[in-house]
Amino acid sequence: MTVHKLHRVEPTPARTTVDLPALIADRKPGYSLEAPFYTSREVFDLDMDAIFGRHWIHVGIEPDVAEPGDYFTVEIGNESILIVRDDDMQIRAFHNVCRHRGARLCNESKGVVGNLVCPYHQWTYNLTGELISAEHMGEQFDRCKHGLKTVHLRNLAGLLFICLAEHPPVDFEEMRRQMEPYLLPHQIANTKIAAQVDIVEHCNWKLTMENNRECYHCRANHPELTISVYEYGFGYAPTEEHAELLNNFESTVAQNHARWEADGLPSRELEHLNDRVTGFRTMRLPLDRAHESQTLDSKVACSHLLGDFKRADLGGLSFWTQPNSWHHFMSDHIVTFSVLPLTAETTLVRTKWLVHKDAIEGKDYNLENLMAVWNATNDQDRMLVEQAQRGVRSKAYQPGPLSPYTEDLVEKFCGWYIKRLRAAL
C-alpha cells in the first residue's frame, strides 16, 4: 500500500463568545450557514460533542485490519481510538488510553501487535482488551476491573463506523438493512488498500462536506472527474437548452437500472440524509464514455474485477453518510473518503483506493492511473473549500441562497446538522 501524507496545520483561532442557541435557532433554510459555524472555536467544540461525539463516524475499512493483530488509530477531537482485529477475527474498538495512568497505548497510526503493551509501565492487554499483565500492583489488585474501555463499532459490509456515545443511535441497523444489498456484491473484505492519501484542508469540516454534496461546481472545476461522471446525475436546472440532454440521461439511467437490478444489483436512489439520526443516501448511476470506471479514459483501472463481477460496465454506486463520509463503488475499484475535523479551520480528508486483494500492481493495475481522477479532484476541491473558508472570514460574508436544483443535498446536510445540534442543546 502506498501512503501519502500532506500535513500542514494552522493555529486554532481564539475562542470567541457566540450565542449558540440563537445562532442555531436563526438558521434560515435554503441558505448557507452563518459565518461562526465555519470559524468559531465555540461552535467547533459543540460540533465535536454533539456531532462527532454522538453519531456514527466512518473511520476505516475492513482491509485496514485484515489480519489478527492489525490495528490503526484515529483521532477524533481529544479522543484517540484504537481499532484492532483480535485472534478470533473480530474487529474491536477501544479508547487508546492505558488504564494505569492514561498513557497512549499505540502512538503509531497503523501497525501489527501480539498484545497491546503500554510503553510507559508495560501494562499489557490482549486483543480483546483484557488486562493480562501489570507488575508491582500487589495481590489485592484486580486485573479484571482494569480492561480497556470499549468504543461502539459497527461493520457495514466492510465499512467501519464507531460511536463515542454511551448510547449510540439505534437506527444504524436500519441503514444496514437497506444498504447491505447495495454494498455486499462489491466485497470490501476481499479487497486491499492500494493507496491512501491524507490531505489537511484549511477550512471548516462543514465546507468540505457541503462541497461534496453538490456537483454545481464540477463542470467548471473537475475536468478529470467529468470525463466519466455525468453532470446531470446530481441535479440540473431544467431549461429548454438542456431538455433533450436531460431526457436522454434519464432514459439512460432507467435502462441501466433495469439491467443492473435484473442482475441482482440494487440501483435505485435511497435518500435519508435529513430524516434519520444516522443519515445516508445511495444511488447507482451510469458512467459516460467507456461506461466502466471513474478513470481518465472511463475504462477499468484494474483488470481484476471485484467480487464475482463478470462485466465492467456496472456504473458508479455512490454512498453518502452523515456526518463524515462518501464512497464510490465501481466494478474494478472502490474509493472511500472520510472527513475528520482537526480544528475549527482545518480538516483531515482521508482517501483510500481499494482493488481486489489478488490484484497485482504493474500487472493488473497501474497506481498512477488508478488514482489520477481523485488525486486531481481532491486537490481541486481543496483549493475551492480553502477559498470559501477565506471568504466566510470576511465581514462582507452573509449566507447565500442554495440552488433548489443542484444544491438540494447541501441543504439536507445543513438541515441535518442544525437538527442534530438542536437535539443536543
Image (cartoon, rainbow, N blue to C red):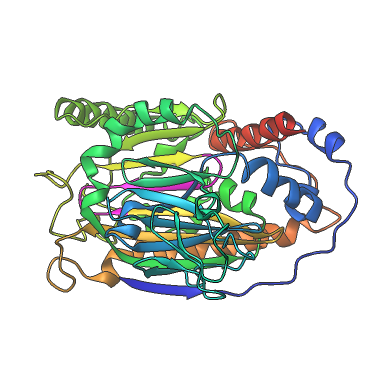
Would residue 285 be found to the left or right of residue 58 on screen?
left
Name above or below for residue 391 compared with residue 54. Answer: below
Q: Quadrant of residue 132?
A: bottom left
Residue in the image at 72% along x and 58% along y: 344
Q: Please say whether residue 331 is one of the residues in the magenta stretch.
A: yes
Name above or below for residue 36 compared with residue 241. Answer: below
Name above or below for residue 313 compared with residue 358. Answer: above
Residue in the image at 18% along x and 44% along y: 313
Name above or below for residue 272 compared with residue 40. Answer: above
Residue situated in front as seen by the camera: 10 or 190 = 190
Q: In which quarter of the image is residue 297?
A: bottom left
**Residue situated furthest front in the rendering:** 139
Residue situated in front as seen by the camera: 342 or 69 = 69
Residue 207, x across and y down, in percent:
63, 51
Residue 370, x across and y down, in percent:
28, 64
Q: Please say whether residue 277 is one of the residues in the magenta stretch.
A: no
State the quadrant of the C terminus. Answer: top right
Is residue 219 among what the camera can see? no
Would residue 35 be found to the left or right of residue 154 on screen?
right
Magenta region, residue range: 322-334
